[in-house]
Every structure is written in structure tokens, then in C-alpha cells.
Amino acid sequence: MNKKRLLMVINDPVFFLSHRKDIATKSLEEGYDVYIATGPGDAIKEIESLGLKHHLLPLNRSGTNPINEIKSIYSLFKLITKIKPSICHFVTIKPVIYGGFVTRLSPVKGVVFAISGLGSSFTGDGFKSSILLSIVKLMYRFALNQQNSRVIFQNNNDKSILLDSKVVKEKNSVLIKGSGGELAKYSYTLASENSSMSVVMACRLLKEKGVF
């Protein structure tokens, strides 16, 4: 009997290690063959050291060259056709959209899309931004509206936007509290009564994230 196969696709190998590594290693324990597909990066060696099978894809998070993007989609299609995964788990914007395109043409039993953010196309102003947003919504709608899929959200705002835009359906949507953190590694200490208040915001300095 063939083992169950899980394919996880994500732009950046470092982001995989920080946000999805535990899902992959737990799936190994549950008896899955686990394949990880990412763009290039030095962290690939660490991924392979965990017993995970890595595949390199020509993914560029910010690239917009149409020829290169078509190559990315075709490479993903070839990989899924070769591996024949039982479940595909797509994380970050391009893998979610491109993975949705490809799995419509591939006999994958289950597809999971993880929406950790909608990107700048949903926050821009002006005529060009509105045209881009309409195109992105159409792409999301085609990618995510599959009978055998689940779309995971990490906040109500993103979920409401895509539900109101009829991009996804409520029955296929799941809301979680976040990617989580391992408390044994990331513990906290109580501040003393005499200490001054300190605020730390670990993120990119973008106004869309509330930084002005």
C-alpha cells in the first residue's frame, strides 16, 4: 500500500522553517512522505536535515515577469504530476494562487490554502490599484473555489474580505489563531514593577502594518 504523501509549497525556505516546520515534522511522525518545495535559499540544507524531501522551484516572491511566472506555474505542475501527493498545502500568496491553478488540473485528493495575509494589492488606492485588485480577486476566486479544498485564515479581516468578495465560501473556510509558537523555546519573563515600559514590533516597516 502506498504511503500518504504531503507536498508543502512556500516561497521562502526560511519562512517554512519559522512557520511550518512543525506541521511537516509532525506529518512525518504520522506516516506521511513529506515533500517541501520552495524557492532558493541557504536554509534548504536545514530542511533536508530534518528528513524532509526538498524540491527547488523557480519562485520569486516579488517577481512580475510574465515569462518567469509561467515557468513557475509549469514547474509546480510538473512537480505535482511527478509526486502525486495525497494533500497539497500552499502557503504565501504566489504558491496559493499558482497552486490553486495547478491543482484544478491535477488529481489531488485534498488541497489546503494558508492565507497569512492578502498582500498590498488589497490596500492600494487609485485607479490602477482598483484594476489590479479586480484581477487578483479573479485569480483568487479561480484558485480557491475547489470542492476538495480548505482555506485557512489567521484573522477575521482577511476572511471577511474574501467572503464578501465571493472569493471563498464559508463552508470551505477555517479560522485559526495564528501559526503559533513553541513556548519551550520562546518563553517570557515578568517585568519588574520599577521597570519602564518597552514596546517591540517585529515586522517590516510598512504603513499597511500600522507603522507611520
Image: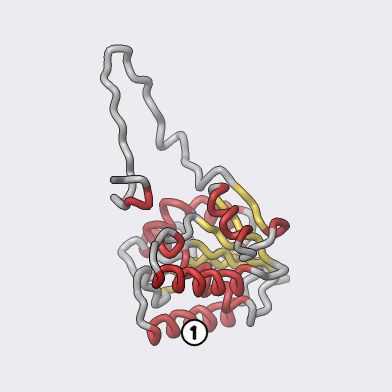
Q: Secondary structure at mark 1?
A: helix
Q: Quadrant of residue 59?
A: bottom left
Q: How many marks?
A: 1
Residue appearing at x 35%, y 74% in the figure: 63
Which colour style is shown?
secondary structure
- What is the quadrant of the N terminus in the image? bottom right
Residue that sits furthest to the bottom in the current view: 67
Q: Nearer the viewer, residue 147 or 164?
A: 164
Residue appearing at x 47%, y 62% in the figure: 92
Residue 114 image offset from top left, x and y in percent: 55, 58
Seen in the picture, residue 85 relative to 196 is either above or below; the reply is below
Question: Taking 190 as reference, is 107 left or right?
Answer: right
Residue 158 image offset from top left, x and y in percent: 54, 54
Q: Nearer the viewer, residue 28 or 207?
A: 207
Residue 145 image offset from top left, x and y in percent: 66, 69
Residue that sits furthest to the front in the current view: 127
Seen in the picture, residue 64 relative to 193 is either above or below; the reply is below
Amino acid type for the residue under numbered disc 1: Tyr
Q: Using a 10 Å C-alpha cutoff, classify the residue at mark 1 as few (fewer than 14 neighbours), some (14 to 19) or many (20 or more).
A: some
- What is the quadrant of the C terminus in the image? top left
Q: Quadrant of residue 38?
A: bottom left
Residue appearing at x 44%, y 80% in the figure: 72
- Residue 49 seen in this snapshot: no
Question: Taking 188 as reference, is 21 left or right?
Answer: right
Question: Taking 143 as reference, is 15 left or right?
Answer: left
Residue 11 image offset from top left, x and y in percent: 42, 66
Disc 1: which residue: 74
- Residue 120 seen in this snapshot: yes
Q: Nearer the viewer, residue 144 or 24?
A: 144
